[in-house]
């Protein structure tokens, strides 16, 4: 995670923003197995700012996805955010039929990524998505190539037809006005 933030920081600086550094855990990841909720907090330093930033993450696991909630505050507000977390988690849940507890092993698919990927910023989850996307592209590559060639041919034909008509109109003599 620190390497990923370090790479992002280099891009931020190139674009004129202050650097960013992941200092470490403000609160290490913990999973509430009964409620199927995961939460943790990161301490982040922006540029030369004397006060570090708190990025508090909440993940609520559902039957077909994850609900992501983030609280951003000053590090000095960590205790306040932690105190409010149970109330926030108590107010938010999936509708019946979409809760984690409603998972049906006979018909539902298990996620290709685990809790560690949710904590790591979804890097592994994104890698799984891109792998799936690449497999889809490979499976439909002939159809994609045909569609691109047909689109280019259509656009070329459209512009060449209009250009030929304009050129012909410029070459043709203008008839005299009728009386």
Image (tube, helix red, strand yellow):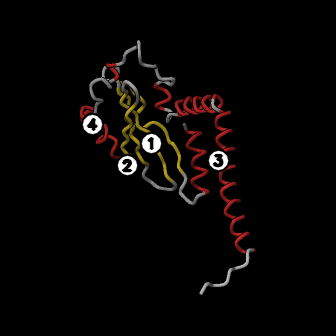
Counting residues from the N terminus, which is met first, the one under dot 4 or under dot 3?
4
Q: Residues within 10 Å of mark 2 (few under 14, many from 20)?
A: few
Q: Nearer the viewer, mark 4 or mark 1?
A: 4
**Residue placed under numbered mark 4 in the picture:** 88
In screen coordinates, is 54 left or right of 9? left
Separation of marks 4 and 1 at Cα, in angstroms: 21 Å
> Which label sits on residue 74?
2
Counting residues from the N terminus, which is met first, the one under dot 4 or under dot 2?
2
In screen coordinates, is 27 left or right of 152? left
Element assignment for label 2: strand
Q: Quadrant of residue 139?
A: top right
**Residue placed under numbered mark 1 in the picture:** 43
Counting residues from the N terminus, which is met first, the one under dot 4 or under dot 1?
1
Counting residues from the N terminus, which is met first, the one under dot 1 or under dot 2?
1
Q: Residues within 10 Å of mark 4 (few under 14, many from 20)?
A: few
Q: Nearer the viewer, mark 1 or mark 3?
A: 3
Q: Nearer the viewer, mark 4 or mark 3?
A: 3
Element assignment for label 3: helix
**Residue placed under numbered mark 3 in the picture:** 151
- Give the camera-side residue of 48 and 109: 109
Residue 109 locus on image (x, y percent): 45, 19
Counting residues from the N terminus, which is met first, the one under dot 1 or under dot 3?
1
The quadrant the N terminus occupies is top right
């Amino acid at each position: 995670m620190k390497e990923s933030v370090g790479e992002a920081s280099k891009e931020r600086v190139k674009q004129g923003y202050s650097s960013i550094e992941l200092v470490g855990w403000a609160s290490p990841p913990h999973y509430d197995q009964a409620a199927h909720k995961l939460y943790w907090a990161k301490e982040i330093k922006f540029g030369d700012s004397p006060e570090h930033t708190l990025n508090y993450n909440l993940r609520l696991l559902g039957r077909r996805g994850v609900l992501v909630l983030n609280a951003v505050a000053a590090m000095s507000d960590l205790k306040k955010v932690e105190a409010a977390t149970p109330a926030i988690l108590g107010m938010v849940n999936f509708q019946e039929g979409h809760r984690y507890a409603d998972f049906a092993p006979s018909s539902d698919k298990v996620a290709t990524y685990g809790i560690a990927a949710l904590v790591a910023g979804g890097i592994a989850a994104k890698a799984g998505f891109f792998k799936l996307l690449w497999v889809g592209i490979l499976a439909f590559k002939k159809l994609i190539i045909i569609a691109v060639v047909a689109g280019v041919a259509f656009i070329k034909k459209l512009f060449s037809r209009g250009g030929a008509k304009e050129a012909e109109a410029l070459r043709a003599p203008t008839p005299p006005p009728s009386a």
